[in-house]
């Protein structure tokens, strides 16, 4: 059964027009995914925009240029991602010890880039400052990661989508986000955290 992180990522891609599926694991028996295992998702864009080359870190505006991808989902570490971790640089340790091995396990040995879908790793975040940011990107690229997508980007997009009239439909996630907004439980300070300017 897919975890919450996996469901969130699937919903994000589907709301952005992608077809999604969980790839079958060869020889795997039906069992619950262990917490330390990466979630895997295959996504396909039925109408990719030609000539739009996404950068290493993906944002919503980059998705039209992504034709298809295998997505490995590395959720938050057990203790959660805190501002102190970011200040101390623990996120670099997380990338070195957790995210890079996840990418290697998820993607393995694959054909050259031209003959395969993009490999996207979803993780809590990347360091904002240099040189840790560049070092993190180099570590991930060395493990075969083509792009990184952060949970911050996903949540920001879902918050904006939840505000659109009638956009929630049958989505429990968007209904919950809409309720949180309606009862002022997601305030301007929290929206700033997700990169959205506070309302005027």
Image: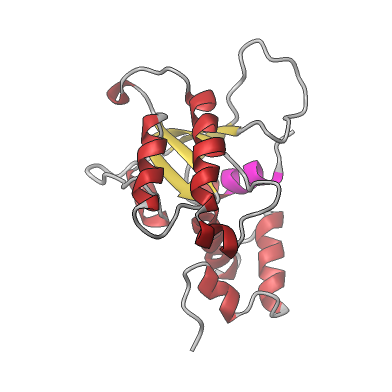
Residue 54 drawn at (x, y percent): 31, 46
Would you say residue 188 is visible in this rendering?
A: yes
Nearest the eye: 140 or 21: 140
By secondary structure, the bulk of the magenta-drawn segment is best described as helix
Q: Is residue 181 left or right of residue 132?
A: right
Q: Residue at x 76, y 19 (%)?
A: 30
Q: Is residue 34 left or right of residue 141?
A: right
Nearest the eye: 62 or 97: 97
Q: Is residue 173 magenta?
A: no
In the picture as drawn, the residue positioned furthest to the front comes out as 88
Q: Is residue 10 magenta?
A: yes
The magenta span reads 4-11
Residue 98 drawn at (x, y percent): 57, 37
Q: Quadrant of the N terminus?
A: top right
Q: Is residue 134 left or right of residue 34?
A: left
In the picture as drawn, the residue positioned furthest to the bottom comes out as 200
In the picture as drawn, the residue positioned furthest to the right comes out as 31
């Amino acid at each position: 059964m897919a975890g919450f992180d996996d469901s969130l990522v699937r919903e994000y891609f589907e709301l952005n027009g992608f077809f999604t599926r969980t790839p079958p694991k060869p020889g795997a028996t039906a069992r619950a995914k262990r917490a330390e295992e990466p979630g895997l998702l295959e996504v396909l864009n039925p109408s990719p925009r030609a000539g739009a080359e996404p950068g290493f870190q993906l944002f919503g505006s980059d998705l039209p240029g992504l034709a298809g991808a295998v997505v490995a989902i590395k959720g938050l570490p057990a203790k959660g991602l805190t501002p102190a971790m970011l200040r101390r640089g623990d996120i670099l340790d997380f990338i070195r010890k957790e995210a890079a091995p996840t990418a290697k396990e998820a993607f393995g040995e694959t054909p050259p880039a031209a003959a395969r879908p993009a490999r996207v790793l979803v993780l809590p975040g990347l360091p904002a400052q240099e040189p840790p940011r560049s070092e993190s990107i180099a570590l991930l690229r060395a493990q075969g990661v083509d792009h990184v997508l952060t949970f911050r980007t996903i949540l920001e997009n879902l918050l904006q989508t939840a505000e659109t009239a009638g956009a929630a439909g049958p989505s429990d996630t968007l209904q919950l986000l809409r309720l949180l907004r309606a009862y002022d439980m997601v305030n301007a300070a929290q929206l700033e955290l997700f990169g959205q300017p506070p309302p005027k």
